[in-house]
C-alpha cells in the first residue's frame, strides 16, 4: 500500500484496512437497521387501512345493459362477449367484456378484457398488466372492480404463454 510519500509500513497498511472494514461494517449495520424499521412499519399497517377512492357516482345507472355491448360497432375491433358477472363473495357485480382488435393489413389479433362495475363506480379507470411483452390478464380485473374502478387489460397480441414456452416446436 502507498501513502503520499511512498510505501506505508506494514502496520499502517493493516490499520487502514481495519478502518475500511469498520466503516463498511457500520454501513451494513445501519442498512440492516433501516430495512428492519421499514419492514416493521409495513407489517404494522393492517390491510383494512389501505385507502380506496370513494364512489364519485354511487347511484349512477349504466347507460345500456351489459349484454347489449356486443352490438357496439368499433373500427378494426369486435366485441366478442359481454357478460354480467353477478355479485359474489369476491366482489360486486360487473360487466365483463372481451374485445378482439386488429391492425389491418397486419393480420394480428389483440385481446382486450374490460370490467365495468355496475354499481359504486369511483369514476376512475385502472389499466392493469406488466407492460411490454408480458401484457395483462383478465384475472387482474375483479380486484380493481372491488375497489370501484373500471379496469382493462390486454394480452398485447401475445396469446397464451407462447413467449415463455419451453416447447422447442413453438419457435421461442
Image (cartoon, grey):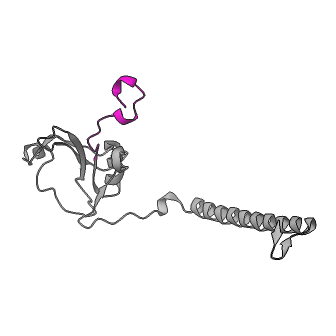
The quarter holding residue 170 reads top left
Q: Residue furthest front?
A: 6
- Looking at the picture, tell me which residue is in the foreground, 94 or 79: 79
Quadrant in which the C terminus appears: top left
- Across and down, in percent, residue 163 comes to 36, 36
Residue shown at the point (70%, 65%) measured from the top left: 33
- Across and down, in percent, residue 128 comes to 33, 52
Q: Residue furthest bottom?
A: 5
The quarter holding residue 157 reads top left
How many numbered marks does the figure carry?
A: 0
- Across and down, in percent, residue 14 comes to 88, 64
**Does the magenta-highlighted stretch encompass residue 3?**
no
Residue shown at the point (29%, 39%) measured from the top left: 158
Would residue 135 be found to the left or right of residue 28 on screen? left
Residue shown at the point (29%, 65%) measured from the top left: 55
Quadrant in which the N terminus appears: bottom right
**Does the magenta-highlighted stretch encompass residue 160?**
yes
- Looking at the picture, tell me which residue is in the foreground, 139 or 119: 139
The quarter holding residue 100 reads top left
- Looking at the picture, tell me which residue is in the foreground, 74 or 157: 157
Question: Which residues are drawn in magenta?
Answer: 154-172
Residue 88, above or below 122? above
Main SS of the magenta part reads: loop
Would residue 149 be found to the left or right of residue 75 on screen? right
- Looking at the picture, tell me which residue is in the foreground, 15 or 164: 15
- Across and down, in percent, residue 42 comes to 57, 61
Residue 94, above or below 171? below
Would residue 121 be found to the left or right of residue 41 on screen? left
Would residue 8 be found to the left or right of residue 101 on screen? right
Residue shown at the point (38%, 49%) measured from the top left: 130
Amino acid at each position: 500500500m502507498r501513502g503520499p510519500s511512498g510505501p506505508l509500513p506494514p502496520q499502517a497498511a493493516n490499520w487502514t484496512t481495519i478502518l475500511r472494514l469498520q466503516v463498511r461494517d457500520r454501513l451494513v449495520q445501519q442498512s440492516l437497521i433501516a430495512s428492519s424499521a421499514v419492514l416493521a412499519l409495513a407489517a404494522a399497517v393492517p390491510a383494512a387501512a389501505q385507502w380506496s377512492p370513494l364512489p364519485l357516482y354511487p347511484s349512477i345507472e349504466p347507460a345500456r345493459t351489459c349484454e347489449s355491448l356486443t352490438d357496439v360497432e368499433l373500427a378494426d375491433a369486435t366485441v366478442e362477449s359481454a357478460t354480467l358477472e353477478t355479485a359474489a363473495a369476491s366482489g360486486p357485480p360487473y360487466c365483463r367484456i372481451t374485445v378482439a382488435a386488429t391492425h389491418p393489413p397486419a393480420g394480428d389479433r389483440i385481446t382486450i378484457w374490460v370490467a365495468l362495475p355496475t354499481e359504486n363506480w369511483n369514476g376512475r379507470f385502472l389499466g392493469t398488466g406488466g407492460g411490454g411483452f408480458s401484457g395483462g390478464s383478465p384475472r387482474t380485473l375483479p380486484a380493481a372492480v372491488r375497489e370501484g374502478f373500471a379496469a382493462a387489460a390486454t394480452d398485447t397480441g401475445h396469446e397464451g404463454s407462447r413467449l415463455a414456452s419451453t416447447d422447442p416446436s413453438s419457435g421461442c
